[in-house]
Image (tube, rainbow, N blue to C red):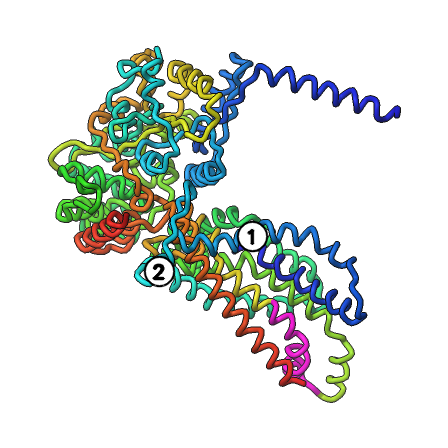
Amino acid sequence: MVKEATMRVLPRARTTDTQQAAGQAWRFNATPYWFVLPYLFFFVVFRLGPSIAGLGISFTNWAAIGTPQWVGLANFQAMTRDPRLADALRNTAIFSLVTVPLLIVLGLALALFLNRQKPGRALGRVAVFTPYVIMSTVVGVLWTWLLDKDFGLVNLALSSFGLGKVPWLVSQDWALLGIVLTTVWWTVGYNMVLFLAGLQDIPAELYEAARIDGADSLGLFRHITIPLLAPTLFLVLMLTIINSFQVFDLVFVMTSGGPGTATLTLVQYIYTTGFQFLKFGYGSAIAVLLFVILVVFAVVQTRAYRRGLSGAQ
Amino acid sequence: MRKILPLLFVLALLVGGGVSAQDEVVTIEFWGGWTGPDGDIMRQIVERWNEENPNIQVNLSIQQWSPLFDSFVASASAGEAPDILAMHPQEMAQFIELGMLDPVDEIVANSEVIKEENYNPVAWERQFYNGVMYAIPLDLAVHGIFYNVDLFEEAGIEAPPATGEELIEIGRLLTKDANGLHPGDEGFDPENIVQYAINMHTNHHAFFQWWSLYNQQGGQLISDDGLSCAMDVEKSAAAWQFLQDLVYTHHIAPQGQTDYARDFLSGRTAMLVDGPWQIPALEAAREESGFNWASAPYPTVFDQPAVWGSGHNFTLPSMADPEKRDEAVQFLEWLAANSAAWLESGQLPIFLELVESEEFKAMPGRDAFMEMLPYQVLLPNIPKHNEIFASNAPTPMMVMAQHIILEQADPLTESQIACDAITGILSIP
């Protein structure tokens, strides 16, 4: 998964805060903009600029060499007839549908568990978070071994329960699940840390007061934890969806999209089309499609979140 | 000031040294994709050149082939390129069509070293595209069989298989389940095999093997005009059927294998189909643990011998600095005649002086591969090579191979699907 997505969202959230603060004073204060400037520079040069260029390229045929040839909407029309793209879309959707709930529920469960005052808490947090700092390629190679059909530790563990050998990465039926498992192990710690931060922002007095009023632990969770964790939950959900739609490195290292097209994902298909097949126009068109999908998700989620907020008030 | 003075002194030294060095030293950028032990060997060769030629320094950059070409495209797009780029002959066409590689005819015409009569003809003819020579060959490689001599002796087998029938017959003897039973024996348990006769690729080498077997029946893949698939699907299916049967019918090759070399070294498979690049690892195992291996030519399963082959070559990107071209060629000439060290990589030499050297003749395991060189068949060198054959993308070849070998899909249906997909790719201008 692409980790940069998080870096893109967090600072932006901070800017709006400072902008609001400046707005309230009714005078222009340049200071905050200086703090944002270095980030803004890199954002424009390495993200916004290429994105706009990508949109332009999507209307052309271009092999990265020579002059791009204007083809209008031909690349977008070609997408409707491309069975590989359909495979990639389907796999990415399935991957997201499975990974996102897993990462949210597991991340939250781990955070709740490791938020309690218990011995070994720090060690538990480190153990869950550590995988996230490992490079994706290393994770990919590591799990390719772990999921090996004949010698992998995962199958060894399964066989001690009397279960048969699972052809994790070498069968169309299992390969995507193998990638899901790896992704969850790799990134759940990140969600956990975000949830932990959210949990620690909830004032302990609220729990005390509710307990005095006779609330049980399920009530505490439903009426205090969840509502007060909503902003974190929203952020985590957003990041997790964006990241899962951008899944690439693990697939590239572990299966290259195979067996057949069983684990071909959108971003891998974009990479393949552009850099391996030198069809940058078509690759950019698919990237535009991915962008539109993510924007739709973002808009729907933001609306739902706002409605939830006003409903609560 | 006391602090600044030494700094200035150092700066002056640096600048002064820089200027005088710039006058004489030419730095050649040389890119290659040798990420295994062969990379170290190439580095040693380059180091030797750099020591002997202080005025022409070669800077070797190594990364895996696929990202290497990504970098090449990206840098060429920005108007820059390495002075020398290594690749495989079948990959040249796409870059030639985009005007990214310069012809080498003139260089060859003026060279005393890089001349047709100094090279293996099979290697030489691979470097042409539309009648123009675009690369200088370095080596060749073909598939062959490595076998575990101890396991062969244990099973009472004297010679490695030369035909398909022999492979299956020998394969039965070399395959054992947990009770020591062989396929075909009463009570043989195919779910509990502890030793297989031979490996079965699940990556791109699966369709490399198919390529050998398809060509053993004589067959075209791409039409003469290059615009459609000309595959004989019956022959294609027959080739795949042979490979699929090894796994699912004869049970002499494992299903879903991922690490062929490891399985061969650990004795889990008695034979390994692969290229001569495995030789250094096998030799290391012989020295460390007495692993007793030998090699044999790829068997002829159908009518005529044919084997998948590839090789490395050097191309001269057209966006490189033209001022450095002479020095780059000088280095390549030296490399051709001084690449005895490259023999250690296992890759097959094609510079005749090296082929005939006593040093090479004394090297173990190479004969079987050299014997098959005349029957080497390269994958087509066409502009859309990657779209059809790329190994780390869902290309028609990879999809066909994995469906048939991993999912036991019907070879005839899959061949037809692949052929239609190839036509779909080629028919788009």
Q: Chain of mark 2?
A: A
Q: Quadrant of residue A118?
A: bottom right
Which residue, given by chain and number where applicable, does mark 1 sit on?
Answer: A49
Compared with residue B50, is residue B92 higher up or lower down, i.e. above or below?
Answer: below
Which residue, given by chain and number where applicable, does mark 2 sit on?
Answer: A79
Horizontal arrangement in the rendering, residue A2 relative to residue A309 (left or right):
left
Horizontal arrangement in the rendering, residue B317 relative to residue A122 (left or right):
left
Q: Nearer the viewer, residue A181 or B425?
A: B425
- Prevailing SS of the magenta stretch: helix
Q: Quadrant of the N terminus of chain B?
A: top right
Residue B297, x across and y down, in percent = 23, 29
Amino acid beneath label 1: Gly
The mark closer to the camera, 2 or 1, is 1
Give the distance between the C-alpha atoms of the residues marked 2 and 1, in whole angstroms: 24 Å
Task: Say which element carries label 1.
Answer: helix
Compared with residue A91, is residue A24 higher up or lower down, i.e. above or below?
Answer: below
Compared with residue A305, is residue A247 higher up or lower down, i.e. above or below?
Answer: above
Q: Residue at x 53, y 74 (%)?
A: A300
Residue B265, x across and y down, in percent = 37, 35
Q: Residue at x 65, y 18 (%)?
A: B19
For disc 1, the neighbor class at 10 Å (few under 14, some 14 to 19, many from 20) is few
